[in-house]
Image (cartoon, grey):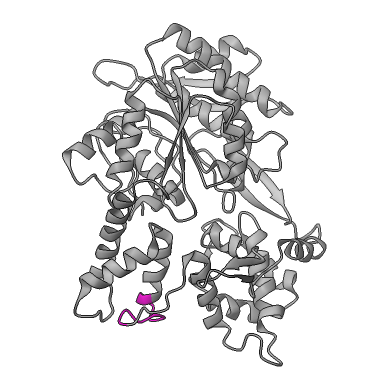
Amino acid sequence: MATVRCAQCGVVLPDGARFCANCGRPGLYLPALIAERADGLVGRAWALDAVWQWLRDDGPRCLLVSGGPGSGKTALMAWLAGAGPRPSGPTMATQLAEVRQRLSAAHFCIAETHRGSVDPGRFTRLVFVQLADHHKLYADLVKQLAPEIVLQIQQEFRENWGQVTGLIVQTLNVGPGRPAEALFNTLVRDPLEAYLDKHPNDRIVILVDALDEALTSLDPLTIVDLVTGAADLPKQVRWLLTTRDDLSVSDLLSPRSDYQILDLARGRRSDQQRDLHAYVTGRLATQPVHLPKSGAPLAEALTEHANGNFLYIRFLLDEIEAGHRSPADLSGLPDGLFGLYRDHLLRLLPNLGKRGDRSWPDLYRPLLGCIAVATPAAPRALLAHWIGQPETEVRDALIAPRRLVDDDPGPDGGVRLYHRSMADFLHTETFRYADGRRRPNRLYASARDAHERISPRTSSSAATTWTSITTPGTGIGSSATSTA
C-alpha cells in the first residue's frame, strides 16, 4: 500500500484521510492508484529544487512540467503531494516539506481508469473542497456570494497551536444543469478573488496533473479551458501543471505570458541519468535472477539505453525478472517503449504472419483493441461478447500478456492496459524502427474498429456504469455511464 504523509508533522495518513489525526492539518486528494506511482521514486533533487525555486520566486504564476510517457511526471507530482519515500538528505527534506505545505489543492486526471477525473464539474468540486479544508472562511464566502448553493457545514474545532483549522465541507449540492464554467466561477474563481482581497498575504497553489488526459473529455469545456481561463485570477494564485509533450495543451497555454516549462525528458540530462542509474542499481540489487558478475557495467548500459525513461527501464527489468530476457545478453535491445511493446507481443505471437495463423486478427487484436478504448476498464463479463469469442478463450488469452494488462481495482473486476502508452502503440499505424526507417506497425489495432465492435454488441441490458467516484468523507461524487 502506498504511503502518504502529513505535510506538517510527517505522520502517515490512512488511505482516504482528509485530515491528519495527529496535528489536524488537511491533506490533499490523492487517489491510491496515483500515490502508488511515487513508491519507487528515486533522486529528482533537481526537479524538486526547480519547483521549490519557482514557488519562492515572484516569477511566472504557472509552472508546466512536461515530458513524454514514462518520464515520471505523475510520480513526481504524487511525491510532491505527500506520497512516496522520504527525501535522502536534509536539503531535499526542507524543500519537499515547504512545497507540500504550500499546496492548497491537487487534482490528478486519469482518463483510462477514473473517467470522472477528467470531468470539469467534478474537478471544480474537488478543488473547492480542498480550498475550503485548507483556508478558513473560504466555504463561508461561497455561501455569501452564492446563497443558492446549498452547503451543509460542520464546524469542527481541532486544536492546532490554539487555532481552529477551519470548516469541513460535508455535502455540497449545486443543483442540476449548472454549466461547468458557471460552476467554476461560483466555487473557485469568485470566492478566490474575495478571499484574497481579505487575505492578500496568503498564497494559493493548485496542482493539476496530466492536462493532456483532460483533453479526452467529451465535454465542450475541459479542465484545460478552466485552468487557462483562470489566468486573470489574482497573482497570489499559482498553478503547478503537468502534461505530456502535447501541442494542443501548449497551444492553449501560449496566450499566458506568465508560465515557464520544466521538461523532465529533455532537461538536465546528467541529473536524469543519475536518477535513472540509481533506480536501475536498486532494482538490480533485488532481482531474484542470476546476474553477470560485473553488475556496474550492466547498470550503466541499461541506464544509457533507457535515455531517461523510467517506464522503459521498469518494463525491461520486469522482463528480465520474469525470465523473458537474459541480463547476460542485452544486445539488440529495442529503442523506446514502442519497441519493447512490439517485442513483447511478438514473443506471444511466434506464428504471426504464417499461413493459417489467426491468433492476432481474430483474438488478440480485437481483445487488446477493446481494452484500449474502454474506460475506465473493460468488464470481463462483456469482453467475450464484444469480440465474439468463447469466454474460456478470452480468459486464457488474458493470462499471457500480463505485462501489458492489469486488473482494475474497481468493483466490476475489469481489465485495462497497464499504461496509456500501450494504447498509443496499438493505435499508431507506423513508427520509426531502430534503423531510423518508418515502417507499418504490424500490431496496429484500430480504435474505430474497437468502438464499432463494442457499440452494436452492447445491448441496453448489458450497459454498465464503469465510473463512480466519491470524494472520501464528503458525499461529493460523480458517475458516467458508458458503453464504449
Compared to 228, does 332 lie above or below? below
| Quarter that holds the N terminus | bottom left
Instruction: Tell me the residue at 32%/56% (across/down).
Output: 40
Asked whether 400 or 16 is in front, the reply is 400
Asked whether 254 or 337 is in front, the reply is 254
Compared to 231, does 468 lie above or below? below
| Quarter that holds the C terminus | bottom right
Left or right of 19 in this view: 152: right
Left or right of 233 in this view: 290: left
Instruction: Tell me the residue at 33%/68% (across/down).
Output: 302
Q: Is residue 72 magenta?
A: no
Left or right of 301 in this view: 217: right
Asked whether 482 or 352 is in front, the reply is 352
Compared to 396, does 451 lie above or below? above
The secondary structure that dominates the magenta segment is loop
Q: Is residue 327 magenta?
A: yes
Quarter of the view holding residue 51: top left
Instruction: Tell me the residue at 26%/81% (across/down).
Output: 290
Quarter of the view holding residue 312: bottom left
Asked whether 296 or 185 is in front, the reply is 296
Instruction: Tell me the residue at 31%/69% (across/down).
Output: 301
**Residue 58 percent location from the top left of the image:** 37, 20
**Residue 237 percent location from the top left of the image:** 46, 21
**Residue 293 percent location from the top left of the image:** 19, 80
- Residues in magenta, as a range: 320-328
In the rendered image, the residue lying farthest to the top is: 198
